[in-house]
Image: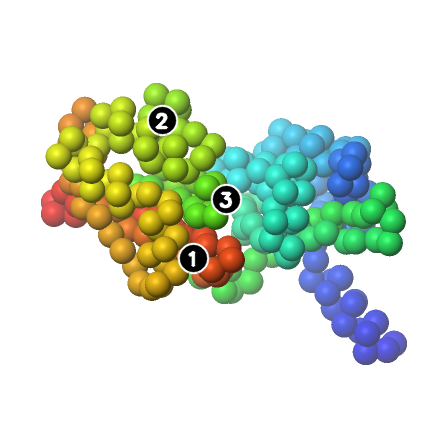
């Protein structure tokens, strides 16, 4: 066995799930699968969408991770993100292993061919390593402190909700596909105290945020009153660059915590 063969075998053994997907049709071929997936007939799925539905229907994905899992195997989302980032998509979720749920990492990349019609998207699943579990523990701690956690792409004016107030994912609260519109509409619908409105709108203006983080990668924050359960409460919005932040791809994290809750 050559060193290359040895390395490839080691990587193959580490992977517990490997699926090749046609990026044009969604058709899939299973190269490696887990016993639990076979028990639920997931390997009979013909497309990545059908596979995802079978996984969820068989309760193989932890109920609190279903939304994130479905998003990260949605073909349109995956194609868009892989083309945008030109890298590997990473996502962690809990899936059924035996009688319990365990953390897994889903790694997705684009396997290019000379003929674009032969391109494939590869989904690989493996048990989360120690570093990933430590990160997830940290996120769980943050979730206990912050009521809202959002990843924002300042260049594309898009966002990904990691955690938010349960009742606020509706048009009533100004939610929009564009982050700038969401910030503005939320405030103008009366959910930000009128005395704090000007400061809030200036602080959340995306152009100003892009310039601010170009000059400094330091965290910035704003104290303001927002309407929560029919009363205005003091909260803190904290913004900081994400680990993947670059001037070409300015991605930041938003955290909101209730200051009055902290004082109790």
For disc 1, the neighbor class at 10 Å (few under 14, some 14 to 19, many from 20) is some
Q: Position of residue 97 (x, y in %)?
A: 61, 47
Q: Is residue 212 above or below residue 170?
A: below
Q: Residue 57, how many percent across, how many down?
A: 62, 29
Measured in 3D between alpha carbons, the distance from the residue under mark 3 to the one under mark 1, in whole angstroms, is 15 Å
Of labels 2 and 3, the one closer to you? 3
Q: Earlier in the sequence, mark 3 or mark 1?
A: 3
Q: Against 57, is 136 above or below?
A: below
Residue drawn where x is 39% and y is 52% of the image: 210
- 73 vs 50: above or below: below
* Residue 56: image location, x then y, percent: 61, 33
* Displayed quadrant of residue 79: top right
Mark 3 nearby-residue class (10 Å; few <14, some 14–19, many ≥20): few
In the image, is 173 to the left or to the right of 259? right
Image quadrant in which the C terminus is located: top left
Secondary structure type for disc 1:
loop
Residue 156: assigned label: 3
Tell me how far mark 2 sits from mark 3, CA to CA.
19 Å
- Relative placement, left or right, of 137 versus 76 is left
Q: Which label lies toward us, 3 or 1?
A: 3
**C-alpha span from label 2 to label 1:** 25 Å
Residue at image coords 66%, 48%: 83
Viewer-proximal residue, 215 or 60? Answer: 215
Q: Are marks 2 and 1 in contact (CB under 8 Å)?
A: no
Front-most of residues 66 and 38: 66
Residue 43 visible in this rendered orientation of the protein: no
**Residue wearing tag 2:** 174
Residue 126 image offset from top left, x and y in percent: 64, 56
Question: How many neighbours does mark 2 have within 10 angstroms: few (below 14), some (14-19), or many (20 or more)?
Answer: some
Which label is found at residue 242?
Answer: 1
């Amino acid at each position: 066995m050559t060193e290359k063969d040895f390395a490839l075998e080691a990587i193959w053994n580490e992977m517990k799930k490997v699926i090749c997907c046609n990026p044009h049709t969604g058709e899939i071929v299973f190269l490696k699968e887990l016993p639990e997936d076979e028990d639920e007939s997931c390997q009979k799925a013909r497309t990545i969408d059908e596979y995802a539905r079978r996984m969820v229907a068989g309760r193989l994905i932890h109920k609190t991770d279903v939304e994130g899992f479905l998003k990260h195997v949605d073909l349109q989302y995956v194609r868009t993100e892989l083309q945008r980032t030109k890298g590997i998509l990473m996502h962690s979720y809990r899936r059924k292993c035996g009688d319990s749920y365990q953390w897994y990492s889903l790694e997705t990349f684009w396997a290019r061919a000379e003929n674009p019609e032969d391109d494939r998207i590869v989904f690989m699943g493996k048990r989360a390593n120690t570093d990933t579990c430590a990160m997830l523990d940290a996120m769980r701690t943050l979730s206990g402190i912050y009521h809202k956690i959002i990843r924002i792409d300042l260049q594309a004016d898009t966002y990904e909700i990691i955690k938010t107030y349960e009742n606020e994912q509706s048009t009533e609260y100004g939610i929009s596909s564009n982050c700038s519109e969401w910030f503005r509409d939320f405030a103008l619908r009366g959910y930000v105290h009128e005395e704090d409105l000007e400061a809030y709108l200036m602080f959340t203006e995306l152009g100003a945020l892009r310039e601010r983080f170009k000059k400094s990668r330091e965290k910035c924050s704003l104290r303001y009153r927002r309407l929560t359960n029919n009363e205005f409460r003091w909260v803190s919005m904290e913004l900081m660059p994400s680990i993947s932040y670059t001037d070409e791809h300015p991605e930041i994290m938003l955290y909101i915590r209730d200051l009055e809750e902290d004082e109790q």
